Each structure stands twice: as structure tokens, then as C-alpha cells.
Image (cartoon, rainbow, N blue to C red):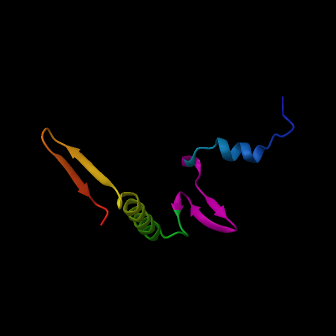
Amino acid sequence: MIQRDYNPIALLIYSTKSGLVSDLMVDGQWIMRNYEIISIKEEEVIEKIKNIREEIFYCFFKTAILNFKSEKNLFILDISK
């Protein structure tokens, strides 16, 4: 039985695995053709991701204090500087 809000396009999009998509067009421009990204410079995206990852790492750990306990001593490593 077909439901009233049945949307065949949404069903196709959300039930398809990403590996089955060979071509992708966004806003009238081809992004991917025959499984190859053609309009995005992959190297630039990877570099931006690396920079963002470093910023997140720095922000997350810049005020962290790591405590290491040994049998006799308490070692404190302050990496907030």
C-alpha cells in the first residue's frame, strides 16, 4: 500500500549507497563524473581539513593539564603555553 506522503525521489536518494553514485551535479555544475571528482581540487580540500584539524587539536589541548601518577611521584605536564 502506498502512503500519501510517498516521495520516490527521497526514497531513491536516501536508500542508495554512496558507492553506487557515479555522477553528481550540484546547482547545474558537475562535481563528479564517472566516479572521478572533477570540479573540486582534492589537494586544497585535504590541506584545509589538516589546518582545521590542527586548530581543533590546539584549542582542545591548549589548556589541558595531564597528570601522570607513578608509584612515588605525581608528574604534572602543563601544555597550556
Quadrant in the rendering for residue 55 = bottom left
| Residue situated in front as seen by the camera: 27 or 45 | 45
Disc tally is 0
Where does residue 62 sit, x and y in percent of width and height? 35, 62
Depicted 72 relative to depicted 1: above or below: below
In which quadrant will I find the N terminus? top right
Left or right of 36, for residue 67? left
Left or right? Give the position of 75 relative to 40: left
User: Bounds of the magenta span?
Assistant: 19-36
Q: Residue furthest left?
A: 72
* Residue 59 sits above or below residue 72 on the image: below
Q: Position of residue 36 (x, y in %)?
A: 51, 61
In the image, residue 22 above or below residue 68: below
Choose between 80 and 43: the one closer to the eye.
80
Identify the image quadrant of the C terminus.
bottom left
* Residue 23 within the magenta-colored segment of the rendering: yes
Is residue 10 part of the magenta span, yes or no? no
Is residue 51 found left or right of 33 in the rendered image? left
Which corner quadrant of the image does residue 33 belong to?
bottom right
Residue at position x 70%, y 68% from top?
A: 28
Residue at the (57%, 62%) spot, across then down? 32
Residue 30 x, y percent position in the rendering: 62, 66
Q: Residue furthest top?
A: 1
Q: Residue at x 54, y 47 (%)?
A: 19
Nearest the eye: 21 or 79: 79
Q: Position of residue 17 (x, y in %)?
A: 58, 44
